Image: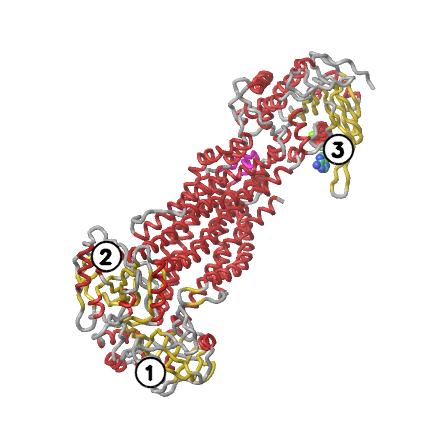
Amino acid sequence: MARRLRSALTIAGVALGVAVLFASLSAGSTMDAAVDRAATDEMGHAALRVQALEERGLSQEALSVVKRAAGVEVAAPALERKTYLAASPNQTPSSTLPAPVTVLGIDPVAEPLLHDMPLSGGRLLIATDAQDALITQTMASQERLRLGDTVTVSGASSGPQAFTIVGIVAGDGSLPDAAGRLVIVPLASAQALFDSTGVTRVDLGTPPGVSADELISQLEVMITTEPYLLQKTSDTADSLRAETADFRGTLLLVAAVVLFAGAFLVFNTLSMTVAERMREVGLLRAAGTTRPQVMSFVLLQALVLGAVGSVVGVAAGIGLAVLTLLWVGSTGPVALNGPEISLGPVLLAMIIGVVVTLAASLEPAWRAGRISPVEALRRGPAGAVAGARLRWLALVFGVLALAALAVWPKSSASAAEARGSGGLTVDSAMWGPLVLYGLLLAAVLIVPRVLRPLLRLVGIPFRVFRNEERLARSSLARDTSRTALTAGALVIGLAMVVALGTAVQNVRQIGATWLTETIPGSELLTSIRPISATDPIRDQIAVLPGVKSVSPIGLFGVPLAGLRQQAAAIVGKDFADDGRLTFVADGGDRAAALAALDAGGAVIVPQSLANESAIRLGDTLTFTTGETPTRLRVVGIVAHSIPGDAQESILVGWSDALGPFGASGADFFAVRYEAGQESSARAAVDATASQYALEPADLGRVRGTVGDALDRVFRLLDALALTAVLVAGLGMVNTLSMSVFERAREIGVLRAAGMSSRQVWGMVVIEAGVLGIAGSLMGAVVGLLVGGSLVAWSIGSLALAFDPPWTSIALAVLAGVLISVTASIYPAGIASRQSIVRALQHE
Amino acid sequence: MPTQPPVSSPSEARSPGAAPARPERDGTILEARNLTKRYRLGKREVDALQDVSLKVRRGEFVALMGPSGSGKSTLLHLLGGLDRPTSGEVVLDGEVVSHLSDRDATRLRREKTGFVFQFFNLIPLLDVYENVALPFTIAGIDPRHGEAAARIKDVLELVDLVGRERNRPDQLSAGEQQRVALARALVAQPAILLADEPTGNLDYATGGEILDGLWRSCDERGQTIVLVTHDARAAAYADRVLVVGDGKIRDEIELGRRAEHDARPLIMRLALLGL
Ligand SMILES: Nc1ncnc2c1ncn2[C@@H]1O[C@H](COP(=O)(O)OP(=O)(O)OP(=O)(O)O)[C@@H](O)[C@H]1O
Ligand SMILES: [Mg+2]
């Protein structure tokens, strides 16, 4: 009975570990597949994409140079812009902006050669000059448009233009950024619509035998007059993948920790079995069974537990994967569907489940093999030193981690080789989780050392139950190694939850400070297209009552050292007046730096970039803008700068932005209200803004959205990490049942001496409570340390006030204690209901 | 039935803290009436006890003897309320104890009975003092002060363990461990002490120490004792020996209270019975 329960619990523990592992592998490969699909959707059959870096796009000259390059079979230029559908006359004006649409101007001949455009109705574009358009199925249903209808889109100065819908592209179309709202028109029409002569990108098709890399080296010497970016399909996939790498790494880490907790369970169970069967094994040995036979008996048992657990785990993992993907919803712009169940992750999860189980059983098996017949029959104390056992388990896991590391880069490196580059992102993303894993492993080793004093300390409040506490504590002290193992699982589970929580809190806080530190206002008015300096919008809003300042900020890319660097154009004076930006020590003088920005020829660099590229105050940065490079002097280094897509922006003045960098205008305005007038002035500002297609957003709301997205992901991770605590709970049931079982006689004696069944019950529950509190507290401390070091590691120093989420930590500790106490109810019931006579007769 | 000689007197040694004695007219403190205990083994039913009746008088030392499997332990468990009979009843100190609820049975064990078993009487992680003090700690009485402390000191003296209070069971010899168990069983001054082969695991000399302890508690303090044993030498300490066989009381041998515990007369009587 006790044994069957133990096996069931162990299987459940292994199964939970494998389930989380499988879910994380499967979620990972689903994300990968989605990303790959998105990347191929976007790049089509093109070998290479020449991407304009400046807002005005690639010039006509550059385009003809590209077309002439040897090895270019097809060149498909396109212009991509976001705009709005022109309001239909019968539509009532509303204060909320409609969703934007993306207009894609294409070469009707070249484009279909490189990009599949499956139609759900109508035909492709044919004539270059026609006012014909394709729209996506999604948009057709959203806007209730049909073939033959007209779709009118707002343009630049020339005003809105109407297009006739001649075809409907299936689904969302191939531009992830467009979110399904895509209008495809001939390139010339798009250029006319947006007053542009440039193109956003040129996709290049090569004949077989010409590699993208050959083309790259050729183009690099041919186009030197303007900045651009060369992109292969693999780069697109990589950049999309890089966004999910952290998440996937953390998912795997959580899975590893849950498995680790599961391994504790296996280890504990088999150790108990071996201890319990000491005599049996001794007899077998005396009867001539060899040492390997004894060991294989234990390993076989582990194999069965591991195999059954893994099968159950994968089944449960499929469900978990579905839930995970539903919960996450999308990775960046790429939407996720159901999980892709392929044989790979299934096998991998099962193999890892079995291997971990076997690894955890090695030591018990070895111990069983070492049982000498004589000793077993004498029945010596079976307790080894706790540290030794844990050290062994930690060693096994260290080796497993190294093995995983050895396997990991190989697979991603070979994949990277196929793509030509990349791969590095995945590796570096794995470092964080690996370090965390190592820290947790190390923390477990400390458990036995601090357990005893901690138990004593934690027991103090339970002294009210003088007798029960004393007995419970001594029972915990009886087999320290088992207690340490049981607590150990709890410790890592909780440490994980707390460490993640601490890290999130920090990210969230950085996010919050970031915005308030870098935005000179409390409201943002964002535009989907740049607003030029001559546009009267800014002044119109600035004169509204209660408005103190309206500061234009433009975001654009600049070529720095061959890479795209995010840049932001700001008005230095506004930042100076509003007291924004924190200059680091030796980061220059704020007033002087901001004034220099407005004067031109100067740049302010974020600390992250300065550290990364060893940039110091007074250095000159050279930007490869066309024929004449632009040189800017570094006048300041700031702790945080305006966040861009993937990195923090460098800050430049508007004169440089509009001049050499070719920025065309502001992407958003930061509005500062007069003190106390925000609520009254707000409505007028928002109304004026939406007249000009500016979307108002409260800074708090922006922060909130960022925080919500983070919360969502981290709540998932928390839930998964709590699985580790749950597994620890199973271990607790196991250990306590075992301990009750072993103490049957002792409990019988206590009962015969007048202990009530309620007191016996209390004794076991207190035992669990003390262990739970000790384990959870230790877990919280370890988690704080680990989380703290993660934070310190990721931001370089603990510059920000280290402010862990105490409430969540308290909740996690409470959860740990509750799970422990819940785990004790079953064994406590057994102990209290046990027949005294039976217990005394036993053996 | 052999006539029963009067028991030697000293029941005035009972201290005020013990359960109030409700003296029966004939001095009976424990009575079993028609006890049957039936075990079900698969489909077969085994009567471990069949219709057993007996009486024990206050201050009496009774030994239960009999071959292995005859039902001695079963009887002892029923007498002490550790188990319930299939039929029949047990009256201890004026209270029917054979059909108590778990709660009342617990109270009974705490207040009126003391047990000594053959093995594993002690809690390994508690020291001698704590083990002896268990009945008090269980009852929520602080054993370090007051009357409880005095009683513990008293029983430790009785079993000659003064000075070993802080030792753990594994630091004691088997005989010493058994003496601790005896001290614990006696400390609450139970109405009856029930011992199941307390010397079964000990050598001759060490067993003698335990038997001396039992004897002194009975003779000097008037402790009522029921002792289960295989051993005629142990049984020879008793005032009366009940011979159990096949779940029944086969015979009763009245030895009377004697200062000498020579086993030879008993062995001869047993031999006459074919045992
Ligand atoms: N829990 C039980 N289930 C089934 N049968 C039992 C149980 N306990 C005791 N018995 C049976 O009852 C009978 C009497 O057992 P008991 O332990 O009372 O004998 P005993 O006289 O104490 O023997 P020993 O001298 O070996 O201790 C035996 O036949 C035994 O097999
Ligand atoms: Mg017996």
The subunit letter for the residue under badge 1 reads A
- Report the quarter where the C terminus of chain A lies: top right
**Callout 1: SS:** helix
Query: Mark 1 sits on what residue?
Result: A189
Q: Chain of mark 3?
A: B
Q: Residue at x 22, y 74 (%)?
A: A226
Quarter of the image where ligand 1 sits? top right
Residue A379 covered by magenta stretch: yes
- Inspect the image, locate mark 2, and give the three-letter code of the amino acid beneath it: Asp
Q: Residue at x 25, y 61 (%)?
A: A650
Q: Is residue A201 left or right of residue B9?
A: left
| Disc nearest the viewer among 1 and 2 | 2
> Relative to residue A41, is residue B127 drawn left or right?
right
- Between residues A673 and B25, which one lies in front from this camera angle? A673
Q: Position of residue A56 (x, y in %)?
A: 26, 75
**Crowd tier of the residue under label 2, counting other residues whose Cα lies within 10 Å: few below 14, some 14–19, many 20 or above:** few
Label 3: state its secondary structure: loop
